[in-house]
Image: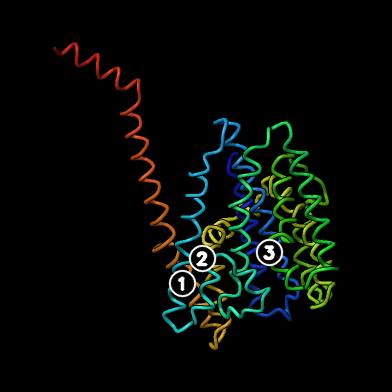
Amino acid sequence: MGRIPALDGLRAVAIAMVVAYHVDNSLVPAGHWGVPLFFVLSGFVITSSICAEVDRAGRLDLGSFYRKRLLRLVPAVVAVCLVMVAVGTEWSRVAPTLGSYANYARIEGIGLGRLTHTWFISVIVHFYLLWPLIIGRVPARHRVRVIGGLAVVAIIWRAVAIGVMSPGWVYNSSDTNAAALFVGGFLAVVGPTSSRLTKWSIPAMLTLMLLPVFGDSGRLIFWGGFVALALAAMAVQYARTSPGWLENRVLLRVAEVSFGLYLWHYVFVRSDIPLWTAAVLTVLATMASWFLVEQPILRWDAKRRARSRVSESFGSPTTNAMSGRLSARSE
């Protein structure tokens, strides 16, 4: 799959929605719609990547897949947790984040304090662990039916769960959030579509998130989530057409550091400090995460893989045969 910069721009839109919601949810009652938008995006990108590798190489290299996701997520998360421990946060609030069960800790009523937002990362980790085991084995001709079927089942289960499960379960659990992830996966295996509806999906989402009705603390907040899911799916389809405004340099830069921004903004916004101070510290921490943690790890991995490829090329049968012929001639 070729890189689509507009998808990165859409990621920046999603993080802006979430940050605004955490700053003041009375002004942006449904800013949490940025979360299903993130999930649909993640499902689309990961599924596209898996299918592209299987089609190209004939199989999915699970070790490489897990290593890349591990290096992308874990170092930044560990850095945040170490800082939180250093400032006196109880281990009981840190362990669920490190153990990737923060979403279920929230369901059990465990207060995570300034790490509450890491429930989202736990859902993503669970998806990364299980999805390649399923999709990597599905033949290309069956992908649309299989992933589409899974998406339908997940949507139905979320609707049922709203009536039979606790609100905490519906909002935080991996199985109920699978609907958005699977919808993103389904979009990855069907052709892109463009219409007037998809063109207006992002403005509609940004407008509707200002309505208190979709930020209500009752069951309506969950039914409104289906509106967010539909708009998020259309937004991804729209971004696939590469609209210029989503490829704006500022949006792309925000998207690049979005993971660190997500991790750190909540830590400071939920602290007892003025908002402007929280904003400054968030920017500084995000930049530190990118330049001192995330980027060095990714560069190290790229160099390590490059060295590995060089070693493999020198150890290949063709290279060894050539070396043997040269040695015979010299003798």
Which residue in the protein does label 1 denote? 285
Task: Please give the name of the residue rendered at 71% of the width and 69% of the height, measured from the top-left corner.
Answer: 32
Residue 321 drawn at (x, y percent): 30, 17
> Can residue 50 be seen at all in this image of the molecule?
yes
Which residue in the protein does label 2 denote? 260
Closest to the observer, 270 or 168: 168
Which residue in the protein does label 3 denote? 35
Q: Earlier in the sequence, mark 1 or mark 3?
A: 3
Q: Secondary structure at mark 1?
A: helix
Task: Please give the name of the residue rendered at 60% of the width and 41% of the height, measured from the top-left corner.
Answer: 50
202 relative to 81 in the view: left or right? right
Locate the C terminus by quadrant: top left
> Can residue 191 be seen at all in this image of the molecule?
no
Q: Is residue 310 above or below residue 236?
A: above
Closest to the observer, 138 or 57: 138
Type of amino acid under label 3: Val
Task: Please give the name of the residue rendered at 53% of the width and 59% of the height, measured from the top-left corner.
Answer: 253
Residue furthest toward the left?
Answer: 331
Marker disc for residue 113: none
Q: Is residue 109 above or below residue 176?
A: below
298 relative to 249 in the view: left or right? left
Residue 212 drawn at (x, y percent): 81, 77
Distance in Å between CA atoms under marks 3 and 2: 16 Å
Distance in Å between CA atoms under marks 1 and 2: 8 Å
Query: Marks 1 and 2: CB-CB under 8 Å?
Result: yes
Display colour scheme: rainbow
Closest to the observer, 253 or 40: 40
Type of amino acid under label 2: Gly
Q: Quadrant of residue 211?
A: bottom right
